[in-house]
Amino acid sequence: MKKVAILIIQISLLSVSFCFSQSKDPVVESIVKEATEHSQLEKLAHELLDVIGPRLVGSPQMQQAHDWAVAKYKDWNISAKNEKWGEWRGWERGVSHIEMVSPRVKSLEGMQLAWSPGTGGKAVTADVIIVPDVADSIAFQKWLPTAKGKFVMISMNQPTGRPDYNWQEFATKESFDKMKKQRDAQTEAWTNRLRKTGHTTRTLPVALEKAGAAGIVMCYWSKGFGANKIFGAYTKKIPTIDISLEDYGLLYRLTESGHTPRISVRADAKETGVSGTFNTIGEIKGTEKPNEYVILSAHFDSWDGGTGATDNGTGTIVMMEAMRILKKVYPNPKRTILVGHWGSEEQGLNGSRAFVEDHPEIVQNIQAVFNQDNGTGRVINLSGQGFLNAYDYLGRWLVKVPETIKAPIELKFPGIPGGGGSDFASFVAAGAPAFSLSSLNWSYGTYTWHTNRDTYDKIVFDDVRSNAILTAILAYQASEDPVKTSREKSVLPLGAKGEPATWPEPRKPTRRGGLD
Ligand SMILES: [Zn+2]
């Protein structure tokens, strides 16, 4: 009995010393303790994702989120403000009710796309047809009057509603190969069908709208069970709705077999005029070098099929939690620590590009930017983004990070400067050392990225907690470093055709969006 107890004490001592073997640093230990014992992540996620909801640029929820973040920072005694950088078309999503009323009755799973016109507070009921396979654009023009008063389906009917990983697991190799071959052929035929109309996926809905169609019906399957990607509508008067793979397939087969399904659609949406676009900026002022900056970065906006939980709710709460912890355990940093919650990343990194353009004095004096924006997973990749000496300072800062968090991170030095993808690229283009804390996949691309399934329940809080600890320690170390970071660029590798690669150029933000 006694022996066992001693053994347990020894093991627990061993694991404690293992965890902190790199550091007896009291700040690091306090960061880990605060993040572990007093985590606010669950509460932040609930308030942001469940109570406020998705954060489409120009929507009232986006503004609520900005105001909420400022209030949170005030609660934590961190000064914060919303900085206006542009304007966007204001639009508010209402309910979507989609029913099949003939040949039988069934509620359908679907919703209107962002910025879709509504149906004026009532249901529109009409037959469903499929965009036809015509010989050419002239034949399509002749066909167009047929679309009048109809809901027109413009997406291919998927041959299977099972993701490939499911086939991989259960199908015979022969039937999996056969399905893939059929799907490839069908996809090619569908691409040709659309091309022959003389329209693109962008202009086809507009042509159908002009011809008097009742609405556009589509299905942007994300290749996972239940997951569709929900982007923006191109129509100006009639609704554009996305329907689940299962229900889309049902309508499609009924149409093909001559059963002429009728659907009833009520889509509510409110145009709310011109809406300001903002970045929320929080600040913990530096004591020794207040004019040098460490920036925690994550875009705040989202698409609105789900609630933007992993894109980029998780990046957002990582940065908020890191700021909260830093303010508590490291309230007097050497350098100023800023947090940037950028608006309208999804339409082209607009908030961060505007910040870079509007604050050259800050950008010149950036010590480091840490951005997170690819899901809920633990950080496993960190690239030097082409900065020649990133290996030196990032390497030194990482020394203090607990082994369990640091060990899985694959470092790439000097790496290649990212030209896009998320907001770090806006800073890299301006020559400022900015880095992407890149996450483990967790089926991000299939299940949550821009989908109707990007919701609270997909968050893996232990991973997010690990990222908040990592971010807080990196910010602490970047702030403490006696040396200002080098911006020297590495010689970039040649491109695929042997051409010299060039550093990405800063790009202008869109400061007026959707307002033609
Ligand atoms: Zn994102």
Image (cartoon, rainbow, N blue to C red):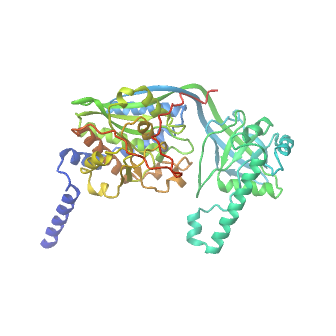
Q: Give the percent coordinates (x, y) of residue 416.
A: 42, 47
Quadrant where the C terminus is found in the figure? top right
**Looking at the image, can residue 460 be seen?**
yes
Q: Give the percent coordinates (x, y) of residue 257.
A: 81, 59
Task: Give the vertical position of 511 relative to 429 (above or below).
Answer: above
Task: Give the vertical position of 183 relative to 498 (above or below).
Answer: below
Determine which quarter of the picture holds residue 232.
top right
Q: Residue at x 58, y 72 (%)?
A: 170
Quadrant where the N terminus is found in the figure? bottom left
Determine which quarter of the picture holds residue 360.
top left
Q: Residue at x 61, y 30 (%)?
A: 514
Count of numbered badges drawn on the protein: 0
Q: Give the percent coordinates (x, y) of residue 94.
A: 61, 37
Left or right of 238 in this view: 271: left
Residue toward you, 39 or 344 = 344
Left or right of 57 in this view: 128: right
Task: Give the vertical position of 9 relative to 301 (above or below).
Answer: below
Q: Give the percent coordinates (x, y) of residue 417.
A: 43, 44
Residue toward you, 314 or 266 = 314
Task: Give the vertical position of 47 relative to 187 (above or below).
Answer: above
Q: Residue at x 35, y 49 (%)?
A: 467
**Looking at the image, can residue 105 be seen?**
no
